[in-house]
Amino acid sequence: MANKRALTEKKLLEALQDLPEDHSDNSNYSDLPADSEHFEYDPRSSPDTSFDSDNDQIADHDQEVANSVKISSERSSPCHKIRKFEFSNRPSTSTNTLSAATQQRSLGKSTSNVCQAVIPSSAKKIITHVVTMPEVTNDVAVANDQDDHDFCHYSDDETDGTENGKNHCSYSSSTVQKIRYPDGSVKLRNPNIELMDQDILYHLALGSESHDLVEMFGDIKFICMGGTPKRMETFANFIMEEIGHKLPTGTTLLDISQYSYRYCMYKVGPVLSVSHGMGVPSISILLHEIIKLMYHARVKDPIFFRIGTCGGIGLEGGTVVVSEEAVDAMMNNYYEVPMLGKLVRRPAKLDRKLVRELKNLADPEDPYVTTSGKTMCTSDFYEGQGRLDGAFCEYTESDKLDYLESLRNQGVVNIEMEAIPFAALTHHAGIKSAIVCVTLLDRQKGDQVMAPKEVANEWQIRPQKLVARYIKRYLQMKGRISFEGHGSMAVKSPRRFKLVQQESETFE
């Protein structure tokens, strides 16, 4: 055993000596400014949690092992980040596989040095590397998910291709490590949040220090969002009856974000009902702040639903559609966002298992059809969807019908305006999500919604019923959940509470 350990440590030393010169030179901290900041990159992970190795072999792909790695960062300038990987002693005598550097991709080329070594469990070494941030250009880059090719939604159990079909993902438990803390709570992919005195969720009229977010939202499991405040207020009352949640005598549902005048938010036991407005920018803003809210509230394994309306393609009004895939107006299944002068693409993926479960919950006795297929997300209601009734129209009805038929042939069954950012941002955060909409008309037969108001209102209840079935079944399977003790307005700092309220009331 001693000879084997000595041989392993010898291999380690040889591997460390083989590091490129520029890599090892940067391990000297003497030139760092005295005021450089130090922060815990992964503040809630346990450094003593063990991880498995595969036959003591070097890993084939870079994997972030946050449970056994204690990561801290020191920043000397906006262009460099220095990380220390400290490996704690473990009682086991097996060897562990370390991927000491992750591949940095930008503008189609690698900018990092990758070092791999086999570390004996009894050893305690510190390996430091410098990641140089890429220059800002006008080229198109792929969002860096450690490595885009091996980052996939944590709950999927199937293999699928990523954007453009160039790469393929293999799903494993290691992916969970990248986007979850050990207790299952949401992990932000932004180390800057930990450095802030307070994180103000401006458009929700909430703050991480002004409100006790753990007390208010710590028991949340389901986040249901839809376009209008009225629809989500209706859903909040509907789900309250469905799950049997009781409000204290003399109280009523509270719009938690009433002082923002932008979105509405209602909490019903483990369910959060939120309006997201109309279109890509509006839902994108809401998702950023809701995901941060889940982080601050330490919510574990949340499930996101979008409950909305859409136009059907070959589907009559009142048909419920469960989205299997989201595509944009150019049939791309990624969300493209300009960042710092370059276009970044994030894969738009929905949780397949969740989609299958929702489809299975459709009742054959429902007086309407429930189907599934691809959902197209556009950034415009009129010309972007091929309508003939906008202020401008530079195509014919024949052009429109040919276009819709081509979409139908490619598997698109409905069109709306929020699916791409919803799928992409929840996937990027490692959150299970699904989209359930109801068609208000068949776009191949017209452009304007002609159904009477009372009929359209009944149609909008249909996707809510399907989501409510899922929530009820989940709660029944998990046993009774206590709905008490959370949800009221819990104030940590009255002064900060007032400041956040005033900031959110400001119209700009």
Image (tube, rainbow, N blue to C red):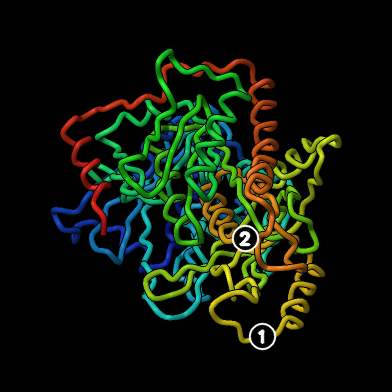
Residue displayed at 79% across by 46% down: 370
Residue 508 appears at what percent x and percent y? 26, 59
User: Does the image show residue 140?
Assistant: yes
Vertical position of residue 271 compared to residue 426: above or below: above
Whole-percent x, y for residue 175 in the image: 58, 46
Q: Identity of the amino acid at label 2? A: Glu
Question: Foreground residue, 394 or 288?
Answer: 394
Residue 395: mark in rendering: 1
Q: Which residue is mark 2?
A: 416
Residue 3 visible to an observer of this rendering: no
Front in this rendered view, residue 51 or 251: 251
Q: Using residue 325 as the reference point, say whether residue 97 is left or right of it.
A: left
Q: Residue at x 74, y 49 (%)?
A: 318
In the rendered image, the residue lying farthest to the right is 364
**Outermost residue toward the left?**
34
| Residue farthest along the top direction in this orientation | 249
Q: CA distance from mark 2 to mark 1?
A: 21 Å
